[in-house]
Amino acid sequence: MAVSDKVVELAKRRGFFTVSSEIYGGIAGFYDYGAYGTLLKRKLENLWRKYFVGMDENFFEIEASNIMPEKVFEGSGHITNFVDPVAKCKKCGTFHRADQIMEEFLHENFEGKTVEELTQLIKKHNVKCSRCKGELGDVSVLNMMFPLAMGAGKDTVAYLRPETAQGAYVNFLRHFNILRMRLPLGLAIIGKAFRNEISPRQLLLRQREFTQAELQIFFDPREVEEHDNWKEVAKYKLIIYHAKKMEKISCDDANKKMKIPKFYLYYLAKMQKFFLDELNIPEKKFRLRKLTDEEKAFYNKVHFDIEIQLEELGWKEVAGCHYRTDHDLKGHQLVSGQSQEIFYNEKKFIPHVLELSFGVDRILYSLLELNYAEDKDRVYLKLPAKLSPFTLAVFPLVNKDKIPKKAEEIFEELKKHFDAIYDDSGSIGKRYYRQDEISTPVTITCDYQTISENTVTIRDRDSTHQIRVNTKNLKTVLTKFLEGENLERLGKTVK
Ligand code: GAP
């Protein structure tokens, strides 16, 4: 069975995520997260928040509306440029994304090809409708935004935002003035984005409603060749995929040889570190893909995608580092008629934007797949402890004598310091199985020895090894273990 199928089964069994509106047959491109999935997602978002918003005293999180008026997207260029190439089947009427249908046919990337090129390719390779084998018509474009008819008269045209970014751009000037009137200024938004994907697929990877975590860094373009903390990353090696080759190259060399600005490289390095050091993505399954001019998004001057290699789906984009220049602010200035210029360092100008953009659901799915593990008939998720829905579980060995009362006392105490869950249903084996599947790194069992000598057992999810420790040392032992100390060194091994 393919790993992705196993992950879907596990996700369903434990309620990480499921198809939305399932009792009505589901709806393509929409997913709901259950209790454990939501806990995991919040932890991922909080880790992102702490890491990226915490990078600079002048970075802040804001919240902006999901619905924005049409003018916003005239200003940003989405009305004209946020389109997908589509080919309609002449027989059954199904629309296909032309670049994707070519990719499925020739196993190459066709992103960024023009409609004329795609029409020619479809004809040349005689590509047919995947549903009915009918002939495909010429390729045209379809806008990917969801329009809304708002209000009784339905005369106010608005859209569901296709990216969180615009919420930061339309608010930039106000926040620049309210905050410290200093650059770089970072405005982060974690929230929903909506896209009318023609063929939503690959589970959480191509949805019509999904979560983005995006940080917009507004800076002075005269300072693009510097960063106060450049030294911190100068020797750090980036894992770059470019011109069909993978290479490890220091930020210094990427600046000198690839001519990528230092300001950009500093944050690209931070993004790589987030994936490798915070999310524990193996280096071999990670790369920064430099996009060619024809692949780059319409608003970007420099564009790297961050990709993770999945078992069956291959390399998948999960995030991007985008040098958007003054594209968006300039567009909003033009359409709104309101100047977006600031006076800073003795000059009047429109700031440039570096965008760090992440797809939360794609990262979450990748984490589930990369951490899925089997050990004989045991299934477990070896997520880093800081991401596991619960950090620990407390079990009473049996539900009788004085054991449940003692276990509850221990649970209540641990709950003050850790994300803990209490579980007293089913056999102890079943409870271990359940916690392993939802990735709980440690389980604590209270037994008769807890009553007689005040000790409990602690079990490590990954090795299944157990130690016995005194309850008065429990908090210290658990803290050390969760910080990476070997379990066997923290207590008496249980055979
Ligand atoms: N603000 C820039 C922007 O939106 P993007 O590359 O279009 O850039 C950013 O999207 C991230 O959002 C992607 O790297 C991906 O992780 C995620 N994403 C994009 N489309 C998605 C979809 N249909 N379903 C799930 N995630 C998606």
Image: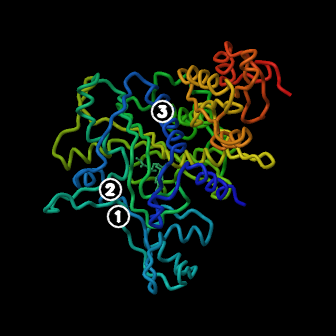
Residue at x 51%, y 53% (from the top left corner):
292
Residue at x 34%, y 31% (from the top left corner):
220
For the residues labelled 1 and 2, say whether their Cβ atoms are less than 8 Å apart: yes
Q: Does the residue labelled 3 lie within 8 Å of ligand 1?
A: no
In terms of depth relative to the viewer, which is nearer, 399 or 352? 399
Decide if residue 22 is on the left or right side of residue 179.
right
- Which residue is most to the top? 472
**Label 1: which secondary element:** strand
**Visual colour scheme:** rainbow
Q: Mark 3 points at which residue?
A: 46
Residue 482 percent coordinates (x, y): 66, 25
Of the residues shown, which amino acid type is indicated by label 3? Asn
Tell which circle, 2 or 3, labels the residue nearer the N-terminal end: 3
Of the residues shown, which amino acid type is indicated by label 2? His
Q: Mark 1 points at which residue?
A: 143
In this rendering, does residue 212 appear at all?
Answer: yes
